[in-house]
Image (cartoon, rainbow, N blue to C red):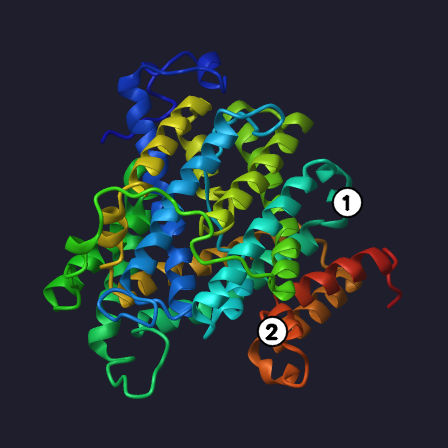
Amino acid sequence: MTDVTITDTSIGTPEQLRDPDYMPALGKAVPLGLQHVLAMFASNVTPAIIVAGAAGIGFGSDQGALGFPDMTYMIQMSMFFAGVATLFQTVGMGPVGGRLPIVQGTSFAFLPVMIPAVAGMGVGGLGGLMTGVMIGGLFHFSLGFFIGRFRFALPPLVTGLIVLMIGLALVKVGIQYAAGGVPKIGKPEFGTLAMWFPALVVIAVTLGFKFFTKGFLSVSAVLIGLIAGYIVAYFMGQVSFGNVGRAAGFALPTPFEYGFSLNWAIIIGMCLMAVVSAIETVGDVSGITKGGAGREATDREIQGATFADGLGTAIAGVFGGLPNTSFSQNVGLVAMTGVMSRHVVTIGALFLIAAGLVPKVGAVINTIPINVLGGGVIIMFGMVAAAGVNMLSDVTWDKRNMVIFATALSVGLGLQLVPEALQHTGKTVQILLTSGLLPAAFIAIVLNLALPEHLDD
């Protein structure tokens, strides 16, 4: 595949390239659409693998209580509903959709809430999670009606802290995976060089392609790193294809695959995280219009994108999928290529939907050893934290803002590190607070609104 940039005038005139409704020639549009899929693919399926692992579902050749088909199904739904949600954005339906080149995918932001929600709970936990995803999606959809009204309460101090806390909550998962999975009694291979070596290959190759190549290769660095680590793991005997042959060639999504179960801790957590996701989407929409067309996003585009976020998440939850949100890496891809065509992204969405209808694709992804995935997520989760630090760079670090940041970070990170501090509270409170993310966000928002602009020395 050739890398296509704004300097390739054969795609269209500068005016056409800035027009979301412009359709390049199919020979150019298809590679551009595939490039969008490759840029987000690894990040899109990773949350499903992590949640499935937390729920006790088997990973690769190490099968858990629920077994191979459930892991494959969750990966399948991640691809299928990322494509569906992307179509909501690019094609639109009435007020739904920004009608911009917005790529949707499974969100990392919800993981700190989802992991404790399903850990050790098996199918019952997944039923409650998917119900929470569905209801949280509907709440997210409702935010579209007044998304512009509460942006004042979320300056870079608050949003940067939230994103930083998401990354900090996930870095432990990356290290555990790279070392061989969640530590278990009787699992002596955890932390051995045999586990770490493929993960280190992923990290080294990813960094090499990210910083020493350009265009398509640089954008797809994580995916290339995972492929390299996978090859190394294969020759080390860590890859098994035994389950690929048992996977179906074609399968449709199943409504309420894991049942319907109301769990108020999960529902509240999903709704609160929907606010964070909505703000992230506002930033991504603004980044697309700025980077691709050199203009500000309209209220109609922001509202439509928020509607599509919520609707895509709600429908995914019905069929056993996880929350969807706009993908920031694809925002950067629009700026790099200079192609604002929403139809290009529509082509990418169709590829995702097609892959999601073929369980064998999910089965092949499920052969990735957990330590190989760990090498990729160490970088991905670290980038989440780094993005939060970057957002905080816009903050004026006076005494007031330092107090807000210090208080929120101390409480949030402290509860994350010492979850036993809440052992005498109910299960609902523990799920909501032990991730550290929600208490940190709540404290930062309240203090930012309540404290005077200038504190005396």
Location of residue 30 by image quarter: top left
Q: Is residue 23 above or below residue 423?
A: above
Quarter of the figure that contains the N terminus: top left
Tell me the kind of residue under disc 2.
Thr
Furthest toward the bottom, the residue is: 186
Location of residue 54 by image quarter: bottom left
The residue under the point 63% across, 84% down is 423
Q: Is 70 positioned to the left or the right of 47 in the image?
A: left
In space, the residues marked 1 and 2 are separated at their CA atoms by 27 Å
Q: Is 151 positioned to the left or the right of 178 in the image?
A: right
- Name the N-terminal-most of marks 1 and 2: 1
Q: Which mark is residue 434?
A: 2
Q: Count the labels in the image.
A: 2
Quarter of the figure that contains the C terminus: bottom right
**Residue that carries the numbered disc 1 in the rendered image:** 152
The residue under the point 55% across, 45% down is 314
Mark 1 falls on what kind of element?
helix
Q: Is residue 450 above or below residue 22?
A: below
Residue 211 seen: no
Find out whether the residues at labels 1 and 2 contact each other: C-beta distance under 8 Å: no
